[in-house]
Amino acid sequence: MPQRHSKNNNDLAFFTYDEKKKLGYGTQRERLGRDSIKPFDACCLCLKPLIDPLCCLKGHVFCKECILECLLAQKKDIQRRLAAHATQKKQEKEEEEEKLTLQKARELDAFDQQNHGAVPQYSDKNHSQDKNGFHGANSVKVTSYEEEALRTMKAFWLPSATPEAPIKVEAPSTNTICPQGNEKLKLKTLFPIYFTEDTSDQKKSKSLDKTYICPSCKATLTNTSSLVALSSCGHIFCKKCADKFMVVDKVCLVCNRGCKEKNLVNLEKGGTGFAGHGDHLDGTAFKHLGSGSGLGLTRPSAKT
């Protein structure tokens, strides 16, 4: 049976719907699966279930070992960059002192040539003549200017004399940053958090994975739940219970420890490298699919 005429008609002045679909015209939509969203009880660094979880004041959750290793690596990198910056400063100071020394040598050579320039050149071979051709009082040691010119000669056709652009090492910041939120992060600002595990017999028989619940309303916590952690004690509640009870009573419902409104930390709903999640999502690039190749051209998004 022959194919449809609309799919084989290629003599039109415009693209048909099927041709546009094959070229990728229009907005591309794709439903993200469960594997594209980070679970609420997973570490932001290793993406595995939390072990001894620590939370920052912005709501990002990490394993204790992962975040300590990350901060230690950042400190080592900061020390390395500080050493490189100090070495560059020392080198720049030495180069400046060398320039001043060369400038003084040039001034001395100019003064010597100006005062002894009128002395005639002797053609007698008996007179001592140095390697630069000067005689008598006009004889001075080879100028450092010529040595510097030969040493700093730029020749693009010689690999050994090809100039190189100097690499400037900027003064690094001494602050460690959060690997998830890119804000300043200190070890003392991290606080441990504690999930309330569902220990009912029904949950144990149905699944081998751990299921966490809100200790107040006993609702099962999922990725769609908005969670709040108390920085004073570390217990985690759903946002409804936190707004309804703890903001009013200013006490933890589990350990009866006092808390203030500033101790309520909203846990971030994370996404992996495939997807982002949250209320503050900014477009960084859009894909314009042109005709012909169907590959598309990525351009920065316009700010609105």
Image (cartoon, rainbow, N blue to C red):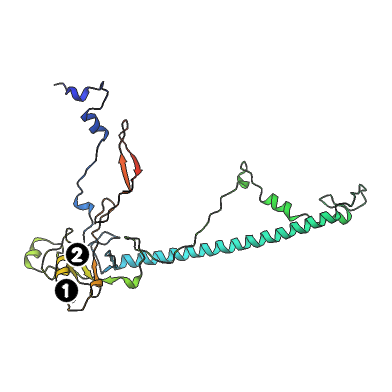
Task: Give percent across and percent down for residue 224.
Answer: 17, 58
The one nearer the camera, 286 or 73, is: 286
Secondary structure state at the residue bearing disc 2: strand
| 115 horizontally vs 42: left or right | right
Task: Give percent across and percent down for residue 262.
Answer: 26, 72
Earlier in the chain: of badge 2 and badge 1, it is 2
| 149 horizontally vs 57: left or right | right
Look at mark 1 in the image and give the residue it sits on: 248
- Image quadrant of residue 68? bottom left
Determine which of the numbered discs, if any, sits on residue 227 in the image.
2
- Image quadrant of residue 114? bottom right
The 10 Å Cα crowd at callout 1, few under 14, some 14 to 19, many 20 or more, is few
Does residue 196 appear in the picture of this structure?
no
User: Which amino acid, mark 1?
Assistant: Val
User: Whole-Å distance between the Cαs marked 2 and 1?
Assistant: 18 Å
- Image quadrant of residue 300? top left
Number of labels in the image equals: 2
The 10 Å Cα crowd at callout 2, few under 14, some 14 to 19, many 20 or more, is many
Residue beneath the point at 34% across and 71% down:
187
